Image (tube, coloured by chain):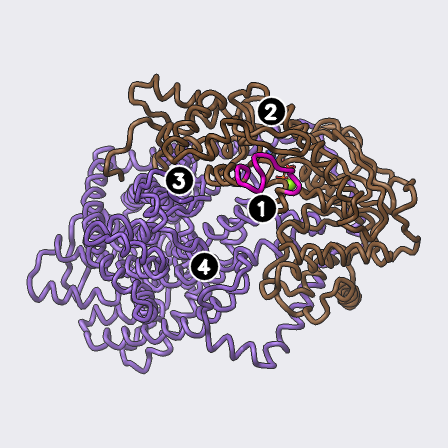
């Protein structure tokens, strides 16, 4: 273990890793390549935890994977130990959201797997692994299989495996988001304790998260990403000393600030006219109706503070944002400075019965979602009033990545079905206007 | 809030009826059906044609070469088969050893071939269509080539014949295992795969820690399926007449062949009993433990619903000797795989190649493949047209149609019988637990051991061979339909059954809306296996003997068998080629599309 003392409060100096002008584009079968990251710069200093925050699809994981050497940058470079990075480097470890443990290996074997590639002799390997298991609070579980452990315990194995190689940089992609709230909090504080007491070999941490509170709780610096393409749009210093108190008014203030910064971006970006290739969040109409009803209820009277709402509904940002955004796209709500409030249309929706809701929803879709109008038009024009889904999918793929295109089409399908704008036949993978015959194969 | 979704269409609830645990399906489904992207549409791609040309060219070359070997067979020492029951344990042992050798060969092959196909795009383009056709080739059709070839390699030695028989069994086992490994390697969990990269595993470490374990459950299951199909071929491959030579290898198959020649029904009874015992032992001592052990490699981290158990495995795990043996082996593997620290350091610098390298390699590789295919196609056409003429081709295709008609009718009839029975059994858990091993066992039992009994009956009652020989084709493989349907029905979710009751689904509607969509993927797997087996079995069942009596039905199987007996290589190549085409077409036009839509109906799409 290294023996220099970390002091998170002191201004960091030495950069352990530099990201310089990184751009990343993904090839697509047709159309322009999809640019996910554009000119991203980032310095990771000694003794620092950096958080990457941003909406889904803004390229946070992509950046992390470039730093981890799992994928290459299309342009720009990552400088580590004074050299450009090629592939996975010694001294950079990763903790995965899904834990990524080998189910067929015991805890001990999983942790040893971290050392296996380094050619460490067997007895040394065992000793190091047991020490890491001890450190991370897994003693007694060495011979258990991952399936016998709870989620929190599994992620501890993930940490032990990453730490056993004595890394200088630790990368974490939403390490706590697959855990329940309490477990996540325990793991966070345990990790921070080790970090503050300087019991970890690591010099710097890069943490991807969706959770603004988590970022403020753990990080020394937060980089906010915009989407399409992903860029760093804000850098926020967190001036608090560890251990931090979530109830401290200054803590709350910072969380609120970041919320409003992120919603401002969402608001200015989306209020204008949408294009056919606009990515639609895959949010169920049930949830939308639920949120409208909640907002219209006595508690909120049509307006709510997003952080408070997220907490009350036990939703994460990546769940609440798309939901609120979809309401905004359809004209049922507005987002501004960290608040969401219902429009008059939204108020009407809350009071209406099912049939009226559907009619209104259909109208909003046709006027505000160009993709929905486009599908409807094509179906109207075609003699058989029928069109295969691939047709629209390939159109969307000219604007979006494959997965985003599929997600968007699936969203519009879900909404259109609810609004009874069109029929979607799952088996034939086709849209149509008329009701299907009583008997289909 | 429910009232607000959908239009209250009962179909929405019902489409969920068919949802069955995907984990179970992953293993039960025939890996050939589960592999995606073999052929996007059902039309042949250029690569299929390349693969077919390569294979048929090879066949022609081998047959051409072997016909030059002359007659080394006469020198083979004759070992008269002893028909006393006391000789049977020894024969059964020999048969089993052959089987084991072929299984080891299949394992090595399937892992190597699949790894190559999964890792290299260039190799994959060619290897997967070849595999697709290979699995459709009627194995029994080229027994002759195989024996002549291996006996030519080891003239006058029994070893040649033994190797030939192992090779034949291998060709009956390897393909679905290969498909299974390939399918696993193509669907590795991305996070584990990234973890391996991030941990900087070498390719070998990656193979040991991720790829092999992940492929294990599917591989074990398919080994068992292969084994179950293999008994049929091991029996068929032990006694063979090529031209005027008869080859007998000591084993249960040759025992039965001798009993047929002797018209000894009693001996056949003993052979059947011996086979029953061997299969039971194999199951209990090898496969139950393997399957129970393979459980630990299931990638879904949750504990399985019903953990398979095996008394043998439990015994082994508790025994101190096992650990005594295993520990040093494991340590040795680790030592071999562990990179030297120096090697780790030196591997850091990437290799620099000129930017046009990939294109140059592409041109060289694909050029070579296409040239070989063109050559193969050309010699095949020349060989057949010289020796036979085009009229013969039409003739053979006609025979193919007759056999196809038999296959279709038999699969349909077997389905009508076994699907309702299978569903009835599968929905009763206790009955299913008892019936499943029996059905599996019946599928493994080499039906050709029973042929003599049937032939004896047909001869005694003067029945028409064109009709009465047909059931023999499906006799051995119909059980695949039964046990797959039982498997499908037994994982049919309980809540969905309740929902179906709740919606008052009765009679035909219940079948159509609830159970058929639920079991369809399983049924397709079973029916495809049964149909494939039918084609193969036609070679031994359309042309049978009892003592000096000889019965023959019209069809492609009889044609191939006739050509084998006559040592007529051009006809053999033609017959085998045409039958492969029929089977490939069947798979592409019927089974794969059916499986896709079955999956869609059942709501399991990846
Ligand atoms: N291998 C790939 N091929 C094509 N597109 C990709 C690939 N990997 C990621 N993308 C696309 O890049 C975009 C950014 O993905 P990324 O996973 O980095 O986002 P993220 O910020 O981590 O999102 P989330 O918060 O949902 O995890 C997405 O639109 C995604 O579809
Ligand atoms: Mg991500």
Q: Secondary structure at mark 1?
A: loop
Label at residue B154:
4
Colour seen for chain A = brown
Numbered range of the magenta stretch: A295-308
Disc 1 versus disc 4: nearer the observer: 1
User: Which of the two labelled residues, at mark 1 and mark 2, occupies the earlier sequence position?
Assistant: 2
- Apparent side of residue B17 relative to residue B540 in the rendered image (left or right): right
Question: In the rendered view, does B579 fall on the left or right side of B348?
Answer: left
| Residue for badge 1 | A313
Which of pointers 3 and 1 indicates the residue nearer the eye? 1
Quadrant of the rendering where the C terminus of chain A is positioned:
top left
Q: Quadrant of residue A15?
A: top right
Q: Is residue A301 magenta-colored?
A: yes
Location of mark 2 (residue): A270
Pointer 3: residues within 10 angstroms few (<14), some, or many (20+)?
A: some
Residue corresponding to mark 3: B5
């Amino acid at each position: 273990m290294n023996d220099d003392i970390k002091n998170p409060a002191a201004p960091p100096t030495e950069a352990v890793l530099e990201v310089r002008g990184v751009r990343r584009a993904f090839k697509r079968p047709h159309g322009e390549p999809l640019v996910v990251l554009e000119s991203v710069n980032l310095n990771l200093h000694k003794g620092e935890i950096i958080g990457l925050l941003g909406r889904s699809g803004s390229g946070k994981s992509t950046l992390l994977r470039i730093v981890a050497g799992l994928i290459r940058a299309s342009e720009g470079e990552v400088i580590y130990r004074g050299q450009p990075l090629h592939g996975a480097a010694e001294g950079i470890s990763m903790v995965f959201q899904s834990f990524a443990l080998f189910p067929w290996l015991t805890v001990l074997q999983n942790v040893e797997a971290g050392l296996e590639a380094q050619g460490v002799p067997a007895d040394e390997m065992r000793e190091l692994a047991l020490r890491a298991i001890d450190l991370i609070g897994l003693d007694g579980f060495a011979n258990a299989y991952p399936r016998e452990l709870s989620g929190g315990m599994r992620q501890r194995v993930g940490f032990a495996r990453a730490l056993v190689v004595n890394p200088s940089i630790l990368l974490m992609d939403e390490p706590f988001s697959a855990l329940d709230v309490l477990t996540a909090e325990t793991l966070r504080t345990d990790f921070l304790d080790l970090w503050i007491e300087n019991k970890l070999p690591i010099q710097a941490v890069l943490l991807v998260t969706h959770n603004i509170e988590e970022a403020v709780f753990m990080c020394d610096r937060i980089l906010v990403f915009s989407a399409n393409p992903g860029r760093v749009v804000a850098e926020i210093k967190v001036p608090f000393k560890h251990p931090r108190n979530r109830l401290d008014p200054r803590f709350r203030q910072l969380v609120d600030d970041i919320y409003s910064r992120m919603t401002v971006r969402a608001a200015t970006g989306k209020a204008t006219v949408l294009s056919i290739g606009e990515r639609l969040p895959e949010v169920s109409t049930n949830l939308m109706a639920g949120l409208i009803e909640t907002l219209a209820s006595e508690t909120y009277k049509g307006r709510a503070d997003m952080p408070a709402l997220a907490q009350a509904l036990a939703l994460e940002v990546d769940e609440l944002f798309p939901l609120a955004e979809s309401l905004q796209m359809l004209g049922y709500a507005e987002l501004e400075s960290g608040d969401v409030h219902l429009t008059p249309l939204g108020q009407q929706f809350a009071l209406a019965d099912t049939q009226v809701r559907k009619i209104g929803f259909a109208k909003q879709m046709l006027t505000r979602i160009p993709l929905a109008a486009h599908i409807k038009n094509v179906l109207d024009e075609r003699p058989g009033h029928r069109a295969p889904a691939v047709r629209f999918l390939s159109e969307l793929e000219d604007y979006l990545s494959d997965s985003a295109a599929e997600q968007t089409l699936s969203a519009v399908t879900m909404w259109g079905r609810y609004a009874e704008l069109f029929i979607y036949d799952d088996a034939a993978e086709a849209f149509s206007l008329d009701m299907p015959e009583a008997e289909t194969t | 809030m429910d009232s607000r979704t959908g239009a209250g269409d009962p179909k929405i609830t019902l489409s969920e009826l068919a949802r069955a645990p995907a984990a179970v399906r992953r293993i039960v489904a025939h890996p050939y059906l589960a592999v995606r992207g073999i052929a996007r549409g059902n039309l042949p791609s250029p690569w299929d044609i390349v693969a077919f040309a390569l294979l048929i060219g090879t066949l022609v070359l081998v047959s051409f070469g072997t016909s030059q070997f002359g007659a080394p067979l006469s020198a083979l020492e004759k070992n008269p088969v002893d028909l006393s029951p006391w000789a049977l344990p020894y024969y059964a042992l020999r048969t089993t050893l052959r089987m084991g050798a072929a299984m080891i060969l299949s394992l090595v092959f399937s892992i190597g071939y699949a790894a190559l196909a999964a890792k290299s795009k260039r190799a994959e383009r060619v290897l997967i269509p070849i595999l697709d056709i290979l699995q459709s080739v009627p194995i029994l059709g080229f027994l002759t080539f195989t024996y002549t070839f291996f006996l030519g390699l080891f003239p006058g030695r029994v070893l040649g014949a033994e190797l030939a028989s192992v090779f034949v069994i291998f060709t009956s086992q390897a393909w679905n295992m290969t498909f299974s490994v390939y399918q696993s390697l193509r669907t590795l969990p991305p996070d584990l795969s990234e973890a391996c990269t991030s941990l900087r595993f070498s390719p070998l470490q990656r193979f040991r820690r991720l790829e092999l374990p992940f492929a294990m459950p599917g591989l074990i299951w398919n080994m068992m399926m292969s084994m179950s199909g293999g008994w049929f071929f091991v029996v068929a491959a032990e006694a063979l007449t090529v031209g005027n030579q008869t080859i007998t290898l000591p084993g249960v198959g040759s025992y039965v062949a001798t009993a047929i020649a002797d018209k000894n029904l009693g001996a056949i009874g003993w052979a059947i009993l011996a086979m029953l015992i061997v299969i039971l032992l194999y199951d209990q001592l090898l496969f139950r433990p393997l399957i129970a052990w393979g459980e630990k490699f299931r990638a879904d981290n949750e504990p399985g619903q019903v953990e398979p158990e095996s008394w043998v495995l439990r015994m082994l795990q508790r025994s101190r000797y096992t650990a005594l043996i295993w520990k040093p082996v494991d340590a040795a593997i680790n030592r071999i795989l562990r990179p030297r620290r120096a090697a780790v350091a030196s591997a850091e610098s990437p290799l620099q190649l000129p930017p046009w390298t990939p294109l140059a390699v592409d041109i060289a590789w694909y050029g070579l493949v296409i040239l070989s295919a063109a050559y193969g196609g050309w010699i095949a056409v020349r060989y057949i047209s010289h020796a036979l003429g085009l009229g013969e081709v039409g003739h053979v295709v006609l025979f193919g149609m007759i056999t196809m008609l038999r296959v279709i009718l038999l699969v349909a009839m077997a389905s009508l019988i076994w699907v309702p029975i299978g569903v009835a059994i599968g929905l009763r858990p206790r009955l299913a637990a008892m019936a499943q091993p029996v059905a599996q066992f019946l599928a493994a039992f080499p039906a050709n051991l029973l042929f003599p009994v049937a032939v004896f009956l047909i001869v005694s009652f003067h029945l028409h061979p064109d009709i009465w020989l047909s059931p023999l084709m499906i006799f051995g493989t119909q059980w695949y339909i039964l046990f797959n349907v039982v498997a499908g029905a037994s994982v049919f979710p309980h809540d969905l059954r309740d929902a179906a009751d709740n919606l008052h689904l009765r009679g035909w509607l219940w079948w159509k809306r609830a159970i058929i969509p639920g079991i369809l993927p399983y049924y397709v797997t079973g029916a495809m296996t049964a149909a494939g087996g039918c084609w193969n079995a036609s070679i031994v069942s359309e042309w049978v003997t009892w003592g000096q009596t000889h019965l023959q039905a019209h069809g492609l199987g009889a044609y191939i068998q006739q050509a084998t007996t006559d040592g007529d290589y051009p006809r053999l190549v033609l017959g085998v080629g045409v039958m492969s085409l029929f089977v490939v077409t069947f798979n592409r036009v019927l089974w794969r599309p059916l499986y896709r839509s079955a999956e869609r109906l059942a709501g399991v799409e990846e």
